[in-house]
Amino acid sequence: MEELVAVIAKALVDHPEDVTVRAVEKDHLIVYELSVHPDDVGKVIGKQGRIAKALRTVVTSAAVKSDKRVTVDILS
């Protein structure tokens, strides 16, 4: 799942070498912390958060088979 988030993020940004994804597990929740170059934060979030919401939707849909909730946090 980390690879999925990284591939999508790298396709969106100008500095793909600065994209890092870290998984943090808590009880029944997995949080993927996405970190990008400061100049690329707006590109990952999108206008009114549309790209971030779409990214979270894709990751949530891909995680349906597991019994854990999944979310993506974008770190600046």
Image: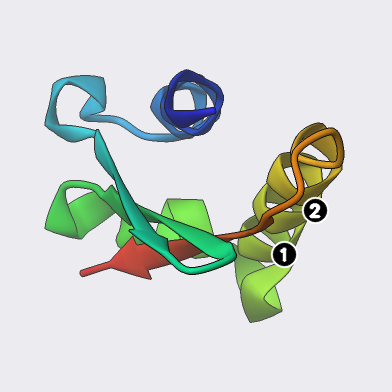
- Quadrant in which the C terminus appears: bottom left
Residue 50, relative to residue 44: is it above or below? below
**Discs 2, 1 touching: Cβ within 8 Å:** yes
Mark nearer the viewer, 2 or 1: 2
* Of 76 and 13, the residue lying toward us: 76
- List the residue tagged with mark 2: 57
The mark found on residue 68 in the picture is: none
Residue 17, relative to residue 65: is it above or below? above
* Of 73 and 39, the residue lying toward us: 73
The mark found on residue 53 in the picture is: 1
Is 23 situated left or right of 67 in this image? left
Say which amino acid is labelled 2.
Answer: Thr
Give the spatial CA distance, label 2 vs label 1. Answer: 6 Å
Image coordinates of residue 31 in percent, x first then y, are: 44, 60
Residue pictured at 48% horizontal, 69% vertical: 27
Locate residue 61: give its quadrant. top right
What is the number of callouts on the image?
2
Residue pictured at 86% horizontal, 41% vertical: 64
- Quadrant in which the N terminus appears: top right
The local secondary structure at tag 1 comes to helix
Is 52 situated left or right of 31 in this image? right
Image coordinates of residue 75 in percent, x first then y, are: 26, 67
Residue 54, relative to residue 62: is it above or below? below
What is the residue that sits farthest to the bottom in this orientation?
A: 48
Locate residue 53: give its quadrant. bottom right
Image coordinates of residue 25 in percent, x first then y, are: 38, 57
Residue pictured at 67% horizontal, 80% vertical: 48
The local secondary structure at tag 2 comes to helix
Residue density around tag 2, few if under 14, some if 14–19, many if 20 or more, within 10 Å: some
Residue density around tag 1, few if under 14, some if 14–19, many if 20 or more, within 10 Å: some
Say which amino acid is labelled 1.
Answer: Lys
